Image: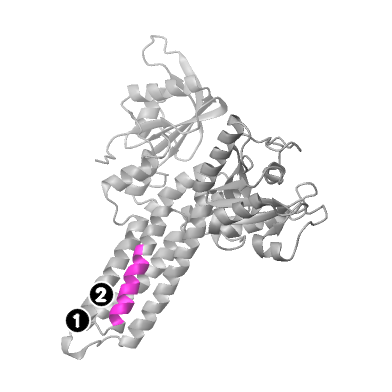
Amino acid sequence: MFSTSDTIVAIATPAGHGGIGIVRLSGPAAVETAARMTGRRRPFTPREATLAMVRDRTEVTRPIIDQVIVTWFQAPASYTGEDVVEMGAHGSPIVLRQIVARAMEEGARLAEPGEFTLRAYLNGRIDLVQAEAVADLIDAVTPLQARAAADQLDGTLTTAIGGIDAALFDLAARLEASLDFPDEGFHFIAQETAAADLDTIGARLDALVRDGRRGRMIREGATVVIAGRPNAGKSSLFNALAGADRAIVSRVPGTTRDVLTERVDLDGVPVTLVDTAGLRQAEGEVEAEGVSRARKAIEVARLVLVVVDGSVPLAAEDREGIAWTGSKRLVAISKSDLPAAWAGPDDAVVGADAVRVSAQTGDGLALLRAAIVSALTGEGPRADTPAMSNVRHVALADEARASVQRAQAALVSGATEELVLAELTAARSALEAIVGRRAPDDLLHHIFGRFCIGK
């Protein structure tokens, strides 16, 4: 199904006009194809940029398609592990498509999405974690996303998984050896030692899974809906967090009639902020639709930032909004630059974790950003990048952790080595699936199918 016997070609740079565009060939005939396209008689030198002309094949005069820089990356020291030729041309989409068509005339096949990276995986240049990190690095929109993907591409997660798997293998090997002495119980390892080793392995998996949940938030982002009654300062706070005057701010209640969104980077977490209509008994059909959309946005949000005006007494709508949003809400007390209008019992209503903030002066904005990140990830902002961020990896690490927990329970109940060993084998299988040592074809199609053509 995944043939590597043919030569593939694709544009490797983004669609659109640019100063330079790259056409990439990979496969056993990549060098010969490039030579025929350029009419070059002398062989290319590996890793040496060579000026050449790609010429039309069909015309008698063979007019020039473009002047290109040809670089040959000789197998196996290339991205795919095969012979790879990259042609740097002028970045006109028409020109690049003509070069691809010219390569196909010489026998190359148009690459499928992600096929270059797939070949790198199949040829052992990278594992599945690193292959997925390539796509994540391309799609990164925050510096922390990019660093997390680059670390995984560099092998940090692979190393962490390898260390845990090695510990499981060592323990399994000693238990396997004990099976040769069925009458002597745990012959090559004491039961207490096996339990201690499992505790250590379980703790390492726990840490990896916790890190993975934070990593998923960094990788996938979250939607934060700003809600509250009219004139509480929602739109002003939305603009302050977005760093731009995106929402109309007015003293007239009910100015916001529709949901307004903005993508922002909060300490490396990509957050989609949603400004909504004020929650109250609507006056008119248009405002009623705005309130309805606000409630729908709140229902699907990861976090609701409930804004209450600290310069006026708490209203029934404030109390209702705080109660209705439940555990997935964070309260922001706006207009902290004005004299506070309430305290005491009302402080208990908004909660001890409420953040006082002023969109006018910027006071408290940094604390609010940190509080949003903490509410989304379960911890405060951290400078280090998560080792794990992919939902597939987290699910498989959870499976491995569950198997280790069952092995621990089996030891406590006095089970034989066979039962413990079966759970260790299951745990190792889950870890092997993360890095791709056990990867069915449909999984590979799913992963690489989301890549762009040319990568």
Identify which residue, 140 or 18, lies in the foreground: 140
User: If you read the primary sequence from the N terminus, does the residue marked by circle 1 or circle 2 appear first?
Assistant: 1
The one of 277 and 427 positioned closer to us in this rendering: 277
> Residue 252's x, y, as percent?
74, 36
* Residue at image mark 2: 421
- Cα separation, mark 1 vs mark 2, equals 10 Å
Dot 1 amino acid type? Leu
Foreground residue among 451 and 290: 290
Q: Residue at x 27, y 71 (%)?
A: 423
Q: Which residues lie in the magenta part?
A: 399-411
Label ID, residue 231:
none
Element carrying mark 2 = helix
Q: Residues within 10 Å of mark 1 (few under 14, many from 20)?
A: some
- Determine which quarter of the picture holds residue 235: top right
By secondary structure, the bulk of the magenta-drawn segment is best described as helix
> For numbered disc 1, what is the local secondary structure?
loop
**Is 407 in the magenta?**
yes
Q: Image point 27% across, 69% down: which residue?
A: 425
| Residue 40 rendering spot, x and y as whole percentages | 42, 25
Q: Position of residue 281 (x, y in %)?
A: 61, 41
Q: Amino acid at mark 2?
A: Leu
Identify the residue at image location x=34%, y=43%: 446
Measuring from the top left, give residue 232's x and y in whole percent. 71, 46
Q: Which mark is residue 179?
A: 1
Locate residue 245: give its quadrant. top right
**Residue at image point 66% right, 60% down:** 350
Check whether the beta carbons of the residues at disc 1 and disc 2 lie within 8 A of each other.
yes
Question: Few, some or many C-alpha atoms within 10 Å of disc 2 (few <14, some 14-19, many ≥20)?
Answer: some
